[in-house]
Image (cartoon, rainbow, N blue to C red):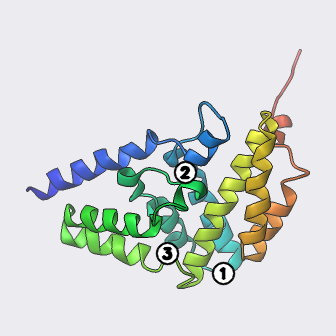
Amino acid sequence: MNKYKQLLNFFYEVGQLKRIPRSGWVQLGISNPESIADHTTRSVFIAFVLAKLEGADPYKTALINAFHEIGETRIGDVNKVGARYLNKKEAEEKALKEQYKNLPKEIADAFKEILYGLETDHNKETLVARDADLVECAIQAKEYIEQGYELAQNWIDNVAKTVKTESAKKIVSMLKDSDSLDWFKNLKKIER
């Protein structure tokens, strides 16, 4: 198959992330939850910032967060309850191996290099990337709490116990007393 056709097919496949809802939020009863792509977008920004704060490579950390969900185009988003009944890591690895086979070798090798050691704290970048992924979940939970889904507090509580970097711990600890709409309240210019 032509290299550019392989790449175009991959781009279509990655587009699936926009269509797949985050399944934990579905279990919570949220009828129109964020997609995997929605989650990934904010986690990339969080990863870059946390990496800067923690002395890790912000570009590699952001790329890890941008790329780490690609296996979910094939297996979907498996939440913690679903993960009790199947080996999510194994399923994602199988999906990634098949995805790599469908990519030009130089592209597949670059993806492998970025994602190496993701499920472990292989290096500072993977540690920070994992924290960024969790911080994004906690921030999303706070937004859902503000919309009336009080049970989303469980996500924040679990993230608070799980994050490892000082920057992530600080941000998560601030969620309780924050308001997700504060960012724009002083931006409105009212004139008469």
Whole-number angstrom distance, CA of label 3 to CA of label 1: 18 Å
What residue occupies the far front of the structure in this picture? 85
The residue depicted at 50 percent of the width and 54 percent of the height is 78
In the rendering, at what x and y percent does residue 115 appear? 43, 73
Q: Secondary structure at mark 3?
A: loop
Q: Amino acid at mark 1?
A: Gly
Q: Is residue 151 above or below residue 134?
A: above
Q: Amino acid at mark 3?
A: Leu
Q: Amino acid at mark 2?
A: Thr
Which residue is disc 3 drawn over? Answer: 118
State left or right for residue 121 relative to residue 176: left
State left or right for residue 147 relative to residue 97: right
Whole-number angstrom distance, CA of label 2 to CA of label 3: 18 Å
Question: Which mark is on residue 55?
Answer: 1
In the rendering, at what x and y percent does residue 54 appear? 69, 78
What residue occupies the far top of the structure in this picture? 192
Whether residue 183 is visible: no
Q: Residue 94 or 15: which is nearer the viewer?
A: 94
Are there few (<14), some (14-19), or many (20+) residues within 10 Å of tag 2?
some
